[in-house]
Image (cartoon, rainbow, N blue to C red):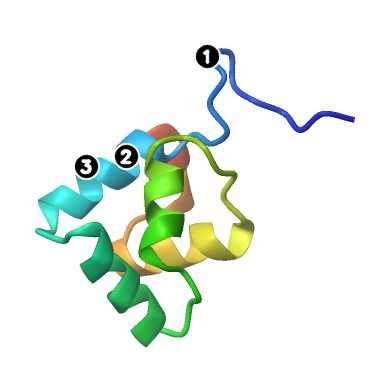
C-alpha cells in the first residue's frame, strides 16, 4: 500500500513552515540540528533538509521536537494556525 501524499505530491505539511521558523530564529539547518540533538532528539542536517524539501515524512516524535524547539503548537506546524 502506498504512503499518503498531499494533493501536490508533498510527503509532509510542515516543510515551508519549518523553513520560515528556522529563518525567523536565525538558524541554519546545521544549527537547528544541533539544537535538536542537544534537546535529546536524533535529527541531523540531512533530516531537516529532506523535511524542508518535502522528500521525507515527519514522525510524531519529530513534530513534537520541532514544536518544542520553536515553542509553537502542532496546529501551527501543520496548518499555520496559532
Q: Quadrant of residue 16?
A: top left
Percent of width and height locating residue 39: 39, 83
The residue indicated by pointer 2 is: 17
Query: Looking at the rendering, in which quadrant would you find the C terminus?
Result: top left
Q: Are marks 1 and 3 in contact (CB under 8 Å)?
A: no
Task: Mark 1 or mark 3: name the one nearer the start of the chain.
Answer: 1
- Residue lying at 33% horizontally and 56% vertically, measured from the top left: 72
Q: Which callout, 1 or 3, points to the residue nearer the camera?
A: 1
Q: Secondary structure at mark 3?
A: helix
Q: In screen coordinates, is 56 left or right of 53? A: right
The residue indicated by pointer 1 is: 8
Q: In screen coordinates, is 20 left or right of 1? A: left
Judge by depth and name the residue closer to the eye, 41 or 63: 41
Task: Mark 1 or mark 2: name the one nearer the start of the chain.
Answer: 1
Q: In screen coordinates, is 26 left or right of 64? A: left
Q: Secondary structure at mark 2?
A: helix
Disc number at residue 20? 3
Disc number at residue 37? none
Judge by depth and name the residue closer to the eye, 19 or 73: 19
Residue that sits furthest to the right in the current view: 1
- Residue lying at 82% horizontally and 29% vertically, measured from the top left: 2
Query: Where 40 sits versus 56, above or below?
Result: below
Give how far apart the Cα atoms at labels 1 and 2 are: 16 Å
Q: Which callout, 1 or 2, points to the residue nearer the camera?
A: 1
Give how far apart the Cα atoms at labels 2 and 3 are: 5 Å
- Check disc 2: other Cα within 10 Å, few if <14, some if 14-19, many if 20+: some
- Residue lying at 52% horizontally and 14% vertically, measured from the top left: 8
Percent of width and height locating residue 46: 41, 57
- Check disc 1: other Cα within 10 Å, few if <14, some if 14-19, many if 20+: few
Percent of width and height locating residue 75: 46, 44
Give how far apart the Cα atoms at labels 1 and 3 are: 20 Å
Amino acid at each position: 500500500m502506498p504512503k499518503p501524499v498531499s494533493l501536490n505530491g508533498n510527503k509532509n505539511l510542515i516543510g515551508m513552515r519549518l523553513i520560515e521558523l528556522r529563518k525567523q530564529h536565525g538558524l541554519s539547518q546545521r544549527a537547528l540540528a544541533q539544537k535538536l540533538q542537544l534537546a535529546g532528539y536524533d535529527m541531523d542536517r540531512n533530516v531537516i533538509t529532506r523535511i524542508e524539501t518535502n522528500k521525507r515524512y515527519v514522525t510524531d516524535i519529530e513534530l513534537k521536537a520541532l514544536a518544542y524547539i520553536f515553542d509553537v503548537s502542532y496546529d501551527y506546524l501543520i496548518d499555520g494556525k496559532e
